Amino acid sequence: MSNYDGQAQYELRCRECGRSWGNQPRSICDECFSPLEITYDYDSIQSSLAQGAVDKVKSSRERIAQRPPNMWRYSELLPLPAGFEPRLPVGFTPLFQAPRLAARLAGDQVDADAAAQNLYIKNDAVCLPTLSFKDRVVAVALAQAQAFGFDTVACSSTGNLANAVAAHAARLGLKAWIFIPSDLEPAKILGTQVFGANVVRIAGNYDQVNRLCSQIAEERRWGFVNVNLRPYYAEGSKTVGFEIAEQLGWRLPDNVVVPMAGGSLITKIKKAFDELSKLGLVEDKPVKFFGAQATGCSPISTAVKTGSAEIEPQKPATIARSLAIGNPADGHYAIKTIKHSGGWSEDVGDPEVIDSIRLLAETEGIFTETAGGVTVGSAGKLYRQDRILPEETTVLCITGNGLKTTDVLSGVYEIERPIAPKLAEFEKYLHETLDTVGVASETAATVGA
């Protein structure tokens, strides 16, 4: 097994047959063709964190709390090469209550006040350096890319991953090749080009782009973060779960609502909670996992709703392009995570996505991209279905920033006419505006009645 500063021991193992593959840039078991994932020596980790203390839990929590506020505070539970020194404070994004959003989502439920106390937002829309949770996974993947000797890194992406790979590669002095569907949001394309990466636009959907990248990875010695580095990359997602638990006072929530594209994030948050329980850092308890997808690309949600254990690929047709993966690599494991936890999956259409983006912004001052609109819209359905109860602690994962998908709001807001810089002009404008708002309110009340 490899180690990080003589502490955490880890290795690749097949998720199905259990064969060990040591540590190398690969993601598939040659024996049974199943995906590989990282496993750890938890006894070694516990000893390292506790450092011989009698109260191992207290000592371990205190040791973590004394570290800088970023994802590297959980280094023992990440697959990092020996001697690794982080160069960017990625992660440890805010977790906070969302009472005004809760009141709207809970609606007419009797305990709407309870929901206001128990709904939390985990806001990775402010994650360094490119404003999405993908910064976490790339930080871990590129640590290994350097250890494996790659001087060029690459990825297939629906946008956020492209931004993250390009930025992290620039900081580390690595060459970057980014492969994207040609219809990606302009802001995400620009947010990749600005870091000097080579951007290759493909006339096809993400699944076609990903297949091409798998072929290129076999021909060139490049580190593809979501192909041959995928097991390491995926582990970075666990830090979302570690932070949720620590920020809740070292306790687990009752529910987590997670947007799903490839399906990895929801499974890794589950793994994070399991690892914290195994180490005694949190009290073990059931947590329900709820997956959120766009109706125009909902292969995992469809499987959960129909009771299927398998994924039927779909052709994406949604404005939530960061979630537009019709054949999700971790879909099977996402289904298992949801079903075994007693959770559920929901999906929302494009109009609901836009309405939910606006709702989150207007209630909590958070501007999320389309994936966040999917999460909020799906959460509303889950509350209305009584699958999420107001008295339960619920965390909504917001994974990306709204500045990346401003194109979906084109035409939603009118461009206000300018007025002269005179008080009389403003007073006239104010009265006209208030009259308009009053008429709109009366109309809404009549329609509601």
Image (cartoon, rainbow, N blue to C red):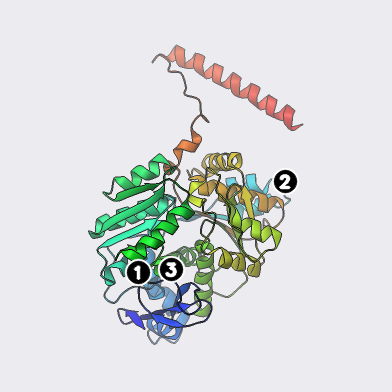
Sequence-wise, which precedes: disc 1 or disc 2?
1
Give the answer, above or below, for where 167 lies relative to 349.
below
Q: Is residue 119 or residue 331 the one in the foreground? A: 331
Q: Is residue 11 or residue 362 the one in the foreground? A: 11
Q: Secondary structure at mark 1?
A: loop
Can you say which quadrant of the picture contains the C terminus?
A: top right
Q: Which quadrant of the structure image shows residue 174?
A: bottom left
Sequence-wise, which precedes: disc 3 or disc 2?
2
Residue in view at x 64 percent, y 49 percent? 380
Please state if 46 lies on the left or on the right of 310 as rendered. left
Q: Which quadrant of the structure image shows residue 389?
A: bottom right
Residue in view at x 64 percent, y 70 percent? 340
Give the answer, above or below, for where 37 lies relative to 193.
below
Instruction: Tell me the residue that label 3 is attached to.
Output: 235
In space, the residues marked 3 and 2 are separated at their CA atoms by 39 Å
Q: Secondary structure at mark 2?
A: loop
Which numbered circle lies on residue 67?
1
Judge depth for marks 3 and 1 and give the one in front.
3
User: Which kind of residue does numbered mark 1 sit on?
Assistant: Arg
Residue in view at x 36 percent, y 67 percent? 72
- Residue 69 visible, this angle: no
Give the image location of residue 423, x and y in percent: 43, 15
Residue in view at x 32 percent, y 69 percent? 144
Disc 2 crowd rating (10 Å Cα; few below 14, some 14-19, many 20+) is: few
Q: Which quadrant of the structure image shows residue 83?
A: bottom left
User: Which kind of residue does numbered mark 3 sit on?
Assistant: Glu
Give the image location of residue 154, x and y in percent: 33, 58
In space, the residues marked 3 and 1 are separated at their CA atoms by 20 Å
Give the answer, above or below, for where 337 lies relative to 355.
below
Instruction: Tell me the residue that label 2 is attached to.
Output: 108
Q: In the displayed image of the protein, which residue is found farthest to the left?
A: 173
